[in-house]
Image: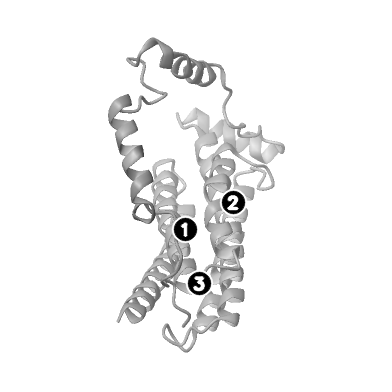
Amino acid sequence: MEPTSQMGMNRTGAQMSPMDTEKMERYSESMGPDVGIDDMNAPAEAQPAAELRAQYIDEAHLVGSVPLPGTVKGAMSTTMDKLTGNRPEVLIDKLGERLAFERQGTRLYELMMAKCREMDTSALDPDVLSTLSHFRDEEAEHFALVDESMRALGADPTAMTPCADVAAVASMGVLQAIADPRTTVPQCLNALLTAEMTDNAGWELLIKLADSTGHTEMADKFRQALIEENEHMATIKQWLERAVVTEAS
């Protein structure tokens, strides 16, 4: 397996230029500690930045909205939920989030498979590609499960809900890390583990939400998805540990 860590001409550290580092330290000591732009107790000259940030937060709109039901079935389902004291838009929003994340998960595993085809993965598992392919297929199945669940509620799975939007932005870094041709297999596994840990927590929350709002049948289906996601996370974690320890020793 190609090593992740190599000695080279890395000039980012302070040790590479002791004289300049000493000048920076003297300057820092003479100027005092930096003042954060969010500190309202900062000196007057630094307060405008904090005030401006507060103004932006105060005036900002929410990240999108959950669409109104576009079908008779959706309207009836929403009305029944509201009559029981629930807010169905919360469940729909989190379903939209999982839908976006599972779609992204399918792409992540496809990118990981492409990476592993070109690099040595013998230290991980002889069946790496088939396992990744299996996980990719399960991510696609989870996507279809959430899509089906949203349609059962009369919701529109093609709509971008607020939580789906935020989840897509948050996971963009993982996608970029795995797609980067310079990253190694262990580095990609580390990024993939970040996504799987988030995914597992998302399914756990969605199951609790479905149970608490009376959608027990939906929650039961999601529990099977969580079992499979736990397997994904455990396998990726094991591979990462094996890759890093093997390289170090």
> Image height check: is 17 above or below 45?
below
Residue that appears at 36% across and 38% down: 24
Question: In the picture shown, does residue 66 fall above or below 209?
Answer: above
Q: For mark 3, what is the residue?
A: 184
Distance from the alpha carbon under mark 1 to that under mark 2: 12 Å
State which tag comes first along the sequence, 2 or 3.
2
**Whole-percent x, y for residue 249 in the image:** 29, 82
Instruction: Between residue 4 and residue 235, name the one nearer to us.
Output: 4
| Amino acid type, mark 3 | Thr
Within 10 Å of disc 2 (Cα), the crowding (few <14, some 14-19, many 20+) is many
The secondary structure type at the circle numbered 2 is helix
* Amino acid type indicated by mark 1: Ala
Residue 136 vs residue 225, the one in the foreground: 136
Q: Position of residue 228 (x, y in %)?
A: 44, 68
Mark 1 residue crowding within 10 angstroms, few (<14) / some (14–19) / many (20+) = many
Q: Are marks 1 and 2 in contact (CB under 8 Å)?
A: no
The amino acid beneath tag 2 is Ala
Residue 32 visible to the viewer: no
**How far apart are the two marked residues, 3 and 1, measured between alpha carbons?**
17 Å
Q: Nearer the viewer, mark 2 or mark 3?
A: 3
Q: For the point 44% across and 77% down, which residue is it?
A: 3
Q: Earlier in the sequence, mark 1 or mark 2?
A: 2
Q: Which residue is mark 1?
A: 195
Disc 3 element? loop
Number of residues whose C-alpha sits closer than 10 Å to that of mark 3, classed few (under 14), some (14–19) or many (20 or more): many
- Of badges 1 and 2, nearer the viewer stands 1
65 over 39 or under it: above or below: below
Q: Nearer the viewer, mark 3 or mark 1?
A: 3
Q: What count of labels does the image hold? A: 3
Mark carried by residue 100: 2
**Left or right, residue 130 beside residue 227:** right
Along the viewing direction, whichever of 91 and 112 lies nearer the viewer = 112
